[in-house]
Amino acid sequence: MTGTLVLAGTPIGDLADAPPRLAQELAAADVVAAEDTRRLRRLTQALGVRTGGRVVSYFEGNEAARTPELADALVAGERVLLITDAGMPSVSDPGYRLVAAAVERGVRVTAVPGPSAVLTALALSGLPVDRFCFEGFLPRKAGERLGRLREVAEERRTLVYFEAPHRLADSLAAMAEAFGTERRAAVCRELTKTYEEVRRGPLGELVSWAEQGVRGEITVVVAGAEESRDAVDPEELVRRVAVREEAGEHRKEAIAAVAKEAGLPKRAVFDAVVAAKRREA
């Protein structure tokens, strides 16, 4: 008989949010695979429980190498508890490889549901939550980041991202460029912690706010593209840009202004202008 893989949700901030079953599973597991063994120690102390089995580290740096070892333990009949620093394992955290390995070997996989930064941020954002998609972390390089955002510029579902505080301003600026400065969004930081804050507003305003410096764990929620938007003729966009250029504006500024007026990403107006220039050539 094979063992069981248990994915354990952990608090994203307030340790009092730990699900009651978590303490039971920590005590019963033959193996506890933890993203950070020091955080695991603080959690068990807060819950007043001792781990019953052996504890091993399981983080991004050793996930690939350690997965076969844990998969063998599961096949041998052991109960393996997988726990990450916060939230649910495998959601932008280690875990996917082990789940896939367990499924491939016919091992039962279950979960201890717990707090989720994605769902908590969605609920607090004030944006539509009936349909959404989780995009994880954006690429660190500016070009790749903007390209990823342009791929979902017309996505109508609400978008959810994780971001590091020191990259927040740059990411919001890229979102404003890809989605338009008026697209609604919410920046949720330090969820369930002492200094919890939810900042809501158009992307353009949030960029200015973030440039002053933001700390803490960040989740960004962005409204999807409007389902019913009056179509703007590309030729009309080109005409508006031309009028502004004739009045003395630089083309870059003219495109940005027209995009804001039309509620479109700057890229859409830029592409219309380039296409018109090619037809003229």
Image (spheres, grey):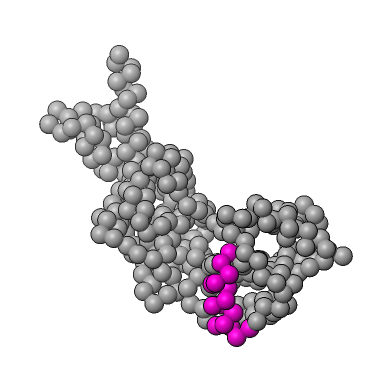
Numbered marks: total: 0
Residue at the far right: name it.
1
Is residue 233 in view from this perspective?
yes
Q: Quadrant of the C terminus?
A: top left
Q: Which residue is painted at 41% across and 69% down in the image?
A: 190
Q: Which residue is painted at 54% across and 56% down in the image?
A: 92
Judge whether 274 appears above or below 54 on screen. above
Q: Quadrant of the N terminus?
A: bottom right
Residue 169 picture location, percent across and down: 32, 53
Q: Which residue is painted at 44% across and 51% down in the image?
A: 224
Residue range in magenta is 35-49
Residue at the far left: name it.
247
Q: Which residue is painted at 37% across and 50% down in the image?
A: 171
Residue 122 picture location, percent across and down: 47, 63
Residue 44 sits inside the magenta stretch: yes
Main SS, magenta region, reads: helix
**Residue 66 placement: quadrant:** bottom right
- Foreground residue, 223 or 5? 5
- Foreground residue, 243 or 86? 86
- Foreground residue, 40 or 198? 40
Using residue 105 as the reference point, say whether residue 116 is left or right of it.
left
Using residue 237 as the reference point, say whether residue 224 is left or right of it.
right
Residue 247 picture location, percent across and down: 12, 31
**Residue 112 placement: quadrant:** bottom right
Using residue 7 as the reference point, say whether residue 264 is left or right of it.
left
Residue at the far top: name it.
281
Residue 45 sits inside the magenta stretch: yes
- Foreground residue, 268 or 164? 164
Is residue 90 in view from this perspective?
no
Residue 111 picture location, percent across and down: 68, 68
